C-alpha cells in the first residue's frame, strides 16, 4: 500500500512529506520511498506556532484556530507530495500525520501531550484515511510519548555485529541505541539528548532580527570562540542529568530559556559570534555527554539525521567529540537491505511506517525507549 507520512517538528519551519510504498510486516517489512518533499510554513504560520508553544503568548481561541489552520496546511502538503510523486489521492491508502507538538508534559499530573493539526480536515481534503495523535496512547501506557522514531530506527539501522546509534538533530536531539543482533544481553532504547537546533534557531533569529531563521551553514558560529563561563552554566541544566527514559522540547529549551541565555551573554559581554559558537558547542556537548552518561557502550557507527546535518560547524565538532565512532548519513547506508533515502526524510518516513503498523493493528512503540509499561497500537484513525 502507498502511505503518506507527514511531520512538522520542534523547529516548526515546514511539513516534511514522505510518499512510501510499504508491504509485509516486521521484521520483513518491505518499503520504498517514492518521494520526499518539504513544504515550508508561511512566516505568519511559523510565528503562530511558536507563540502557541509559549504560555505567555498562547490563548485557547488561538489554539483552536491553529489546529484547523494546521489541518489545512498538512492536507495541502500531502496533496503536493502525492502530486509530485506522480500519483493521485485515489492511489494512496493511508496518511500518517504526527501533527505539530505545542506542549509535551509527560512528567505532569496527569501526564499529557498536545499535537495540533486536525485529522478530520486532512481526511476531508484528501479523501484518504488518517492516523494521527500517535504520542497519546504511549503516554496513556505510562510512556514519555517519544521518541517514537526509535521503533523505526531499530528496523532500519540495526546491524548484525556492530553497535550503532541513530542520532537525530532536529529542534531537539534524540538518540536510539542499537545493539547488534548477535548480542541478546543488550536492548535497544532511546531518549532525547537535549536541544538540537532549537536554541541555535531562536538565537539566529534574535541576532539577525528575523532575517535568518537558522544559522546558515554555521556561518554565525564559525567566526566565534566558545565562552567557557556560559557553556559551563548551560551544561548545568537539570534535564541533562535526568536518567532515561526522558523526553524534552520547547517547554524546557524554547524561547524562554533562550531569552535567559541572551541576558546572561549580555552580562558577560559576549558578542554574536561567540554566543552562536557557545550554543553550537552546547548542542554537541549534550549529545557527547549523553553517550558517556547513559549508553552502555560507545557505538562504532552513528547514523545522523535531521536539520543539524546541514550545519558543517556542528557536524565537525560532533565528529571530533564522538571519535573514534564514524558519523554516517542515512544515504550512506543504502544497500540491497536498506533502500536509499536522505536523512531529512527519516521522520516523515517513520510516521508513514508507524501509520501502516497501526492500520494493521500492530504496536509501534518501543517501551525500552519511551518507558511505557507495554507495547501499544499507536494513534487514532479518522476515516476518509
Image (cartoon, helix red, strand yellow):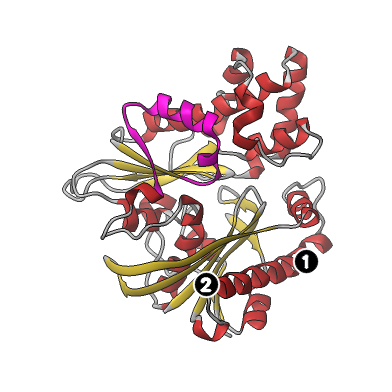
Q: Residues within 10 Å of mark 2 (few under 14, many from 20)?
A: some
Q: Which mark is residue 81?
A: none
Residue at point 66%, 27% (across, down) = 220
Q: Residues within 10 Å of mark 1 (few under 14, many from 20)?
A: few
| Region of the chain picked out in magenta, as a range | 305-330
x and y percentages locating residue 104 in the rendered image = 61, 52
The quadrant holding residue 297 is top left
Position above or below: 240 against 128? above
Residue annotated with mark 1: 64
Q: CA distance from mark 2 to mark 1?
A: 32 Å
Is residue 118 at least partly visible in the picture? no
x and y percentages locating residue 150 in the rendered image = 40, 53
Q: Is residue 374 left or right of residue 262?
A: left
x and y percentages locating residue 264 in the rendered image = 73, 20
Residue 313: in magenta span: yes
Is residue 50 at least partly visible in the picture? yes
Q: Are marks 2 and 1 in contact (CB under 8 Å)?
A: no
Check the picture and name the quadrant holding the C terminus: bottom right
Which element is circle 2 on? loop
Of discs 2 and 1, which sits in the foreground?
Answer: 2
Q: What main secondary structure does the magenta stretch of the protein show? A: helix
Residue annotated with mark 2: 85
Residue 225: in magenta span: no
Q: Identify the mark nearer the N-term, 2 or 1.
A: 1
Residue at point 62%, 13% (across, down) = 229
Residue at point 56%, 51% (across, down) = 106
Which element is circle 1 on? helix
The quadrant holding residue 307 is top right
Amino acid at each position: 500500500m502507498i502511505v503518506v507520512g507527514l511531520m512538522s517538528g520542534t523547529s516548526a519551519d515546514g511539513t516534511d512529506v514522505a510518499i512510501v510504498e510499504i508491504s509485509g510486516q516486521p521484521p520483513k517489512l518491505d518499503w520504498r520511498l517514492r518521494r520526499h518533499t518539504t513544504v515550508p510554513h508561511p512566516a505568519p504560520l511559523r510565528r503562530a506556532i511558536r507563540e502557541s508553544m509559549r504560555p505567555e503568548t498562547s490563548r485557547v481561541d488561538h489554539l483552536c484556530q491553529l489546529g484547523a489552520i494546521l489541518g489545512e496546511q498538512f492536507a495541502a502538503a500531502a496533496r503536493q507530495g502525492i502530486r509530485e510523486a506522480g500519483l493521485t489521492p485515489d492511489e494512496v491508502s493511508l496518511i500518517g500525520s504526527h501533527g505539530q507538538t505545542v506542549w509535551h508534559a509527560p512528567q505532569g499530573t496527569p501526564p499529557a501531550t498536545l499535537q495540533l493539526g486536525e485529522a478530520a480536515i486532512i481526511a476531508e481534503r484528501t479523501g484518504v484515511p488518517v492516523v494521527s495523535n500517535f504520542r497519546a496512547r504511549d503516554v496513556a501506557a505510562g510512556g514519555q510519548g517519544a521518541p517514537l522514531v526509535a521503533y523505526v530506527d531499530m528496523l532500519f539501522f540495526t546491524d548484525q555485529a556492530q553497535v550503532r546509534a541513530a542520532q537525530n538533530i532536529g529542534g531537539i536531539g534524540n538518540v536510539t541505541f542499537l545493539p547488534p543482533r548477535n548480542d541478546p544481553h543488550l536492548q535497544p532504547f532511546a531518549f532525547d539528548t537535549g536541544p538540537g537546533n532549537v536554541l541555535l534557531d531562536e538565537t539566529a533569529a534574535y541576532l539577525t532580527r528575523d532575517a535568518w531563521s537558522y544559522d546558515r551553514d554555521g556561518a554565525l558560529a564559525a567566526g566565534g570562540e566558545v565562552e567557557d563561563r556560559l557553556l559551563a552554566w548551560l551544561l548545568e541544566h537539570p534535564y541533562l542529568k535526568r536518567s532515561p527514559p526522558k523526553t524534552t522540547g520547547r517547554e524546557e529549551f524554547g524561547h524562554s530559556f533562550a531569552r535567559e541565555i541572551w541576558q546572561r551573554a549580555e552580562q558577560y559581554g559576549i558578542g554574536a559570534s561567540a554566543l552562536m559558537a557557545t550554543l553550537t558547542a552546547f548542542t554537541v556537548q549534550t549529545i557527547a555527554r549523553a553517550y558517556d552518561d547513559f549508553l552502555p557502550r560507545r557505538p562504532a557507527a552513528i547514523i545522523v539525521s535531521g536539520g543539524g546535518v546541514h550545519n558543517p560547524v556542528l557536524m565537525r565538532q560532533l565528529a571530533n567529540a564522538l571519535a573514534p565512532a564514524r558519523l554516517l548519513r542515512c544515504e550512506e547506508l543504502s544497500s540491497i537491505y536498506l533502500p536509499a533515502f536522505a536523512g531529512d526524510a527519516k521522520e516523515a518516513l517513520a510516521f508513514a511506517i508507524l501509520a501502516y503498523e497501526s492500520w494493521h493493528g500492530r504496536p509501534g512503540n518501543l517501551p525500552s525507549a519511551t518507558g511505557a509499561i507495554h507495547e501499544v497500537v499507536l494513534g487514532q484513525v479518522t476515516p476518509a
